[in-house]
Image (tube, rainbow, N blue to C red):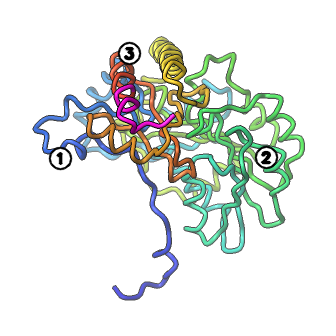
Amino acid sequence: MSTIPNMWIKNLAFYEPGRPIDELARELGLSSADEIIKLASNENALGPSPKAVDAMQRAASNMHIYPDGGSFYLRLALAQKYHVDMDQIIVGNGSNEIIEFLAHVYLQPGSNLVMADKAFIVYKLIAPAYQAEAITVPMVDLTHDLDAMLAAITPQTRMVFIANPNNPTGTMLSQDALDAFMDQVPASVAVVFDEAYIELLPPDRQPDTMAYVKSRPNVYVLRTFSKAYGLAGLRVGYGISTAENIQLLNRVRQPFNVNAMAQEAAMAALEDDEHVEIIRKLVIDGLAFLQNAFEEMGLEYVPSVANFILVKVGRGRKVFDALQQRLIIVRPMDGYGLPEYVRITVGTADQNRRLVLVMKQLIEEGIIEK
């Protein structure tokens, strides 16, 4: 069509995901993708809980039946875990879908949202889809500057997004910093805590944002089963807020938005604390190994609390391409305004060792610049 009703749609930017393994295999003419390792999308290196896999297998024979449109039992399990009412929870096709629900409810032409400039790029991409503005606030030491974000709020601000831990920097805000922010943020502005990586931290290191949900009417907490629980392929996430807020989100939610297998797997995964603890240890050990290796190689990096790490390599896109030729997929960061960096997901011990070996080769070849 030469014209469409909403011509501004043509100017919207795309999200660049981590490159699929099979796509690289096709490009390189490989008959098998087995030798390729993907350290680009912050996926769980060990995969889902065996309990979740069993739940998926049991559910498979019922895929001719529509899922529970309200995700009753998953919401019940989450309500019991967080000590909230079921009607305070919404389940989405990944937490990304809930971000879209929030945009439906809060954004309109002339409004804006406030975010950190190096935070999850989806916030920035979704605002213009509603003819709204994303006000990006510079980070300090690649960490959210909450004082500057408060100062950036205008009468047209509808939401503030705080990714904690933050993707792609791996940095995290303290409880004290969050408390000071919440004491000052206007009640008319929705505060959205995007905590996709929070379960990778031991419980005693996780900020208590649920306390804000229980004490304030303008707070949303978003979480996902994609990271610590290893269910990225099923796309299931959830949001928690007041019952009134969740009712608004449900008004823009399509029926059957979360498939039946995802619901069953998520409930099983939620019960397997032992598997999550194994993942936490793998991430802690992997981060320590990579950080030590980067120091030995003389490469700058951003200390991370999540399952990925930013490392400064000079020309990030060139290094990304060179690693692909050696069957390793990482994530270039030029889309985030960090062209000298790549983001590397913590893999298994063998994958981490192979990555470091190849990076040392790229340093010797002058492709990685110190």
Residue extending farthest to the bottom is: 2
Contact check, label 3 and label 2, Cβ < 8 Å? no
**Tag count in the figure?**
3
Q: Which mark is residue 61?
A: none
Q: Is label 3 or label 2 in front? A: 3
Tell me the residue at 55%/60% (across/down): 125
- Distance (Cα) linking label 3 and label 2: 44 Å
As for residue 95 lying within the magenta part, the answer is no
Q: Is residue 46 left or right of residue 304?
A: left
For the residue marked with disc 3, what is the amino acid? Ala
Front residue (pair 197, 93): 197
Q: Is residue 271 visible?
A: no
**Which range is magenta?**
360-370
Residue marked by disc 3: 349
Image coords of residue 109 (percent x, y):
66, 74
* Sequence order check, earlier mark of 1 and 2: 1
Residue 328 visible in the displayed image: yes
Residue at image x 64%, y 56%?
248
Q: Is residue 365 magenta?
A: yes
* Amino acid at dot 2: Pro
Q: Residue 87 sits in which quadrant?
A: top right
Q: Secondary structure at mark 2?
A: loop
N-terminal label among 3 and 2? 2
Q: Which residue is mark 2?
A: 217
**Left or right: 324 in relation to 103:** left
Q: Is 145 drawn above or below residue 304 in the view shown?
A: below
Q: For marks 1 and 2, give the CA distance.
A: 50 Å
Q: Amino acid at mark 1?
A: Arg
**Image marks 3 and 1: residues in contact by CB distance under 8 Å:** no
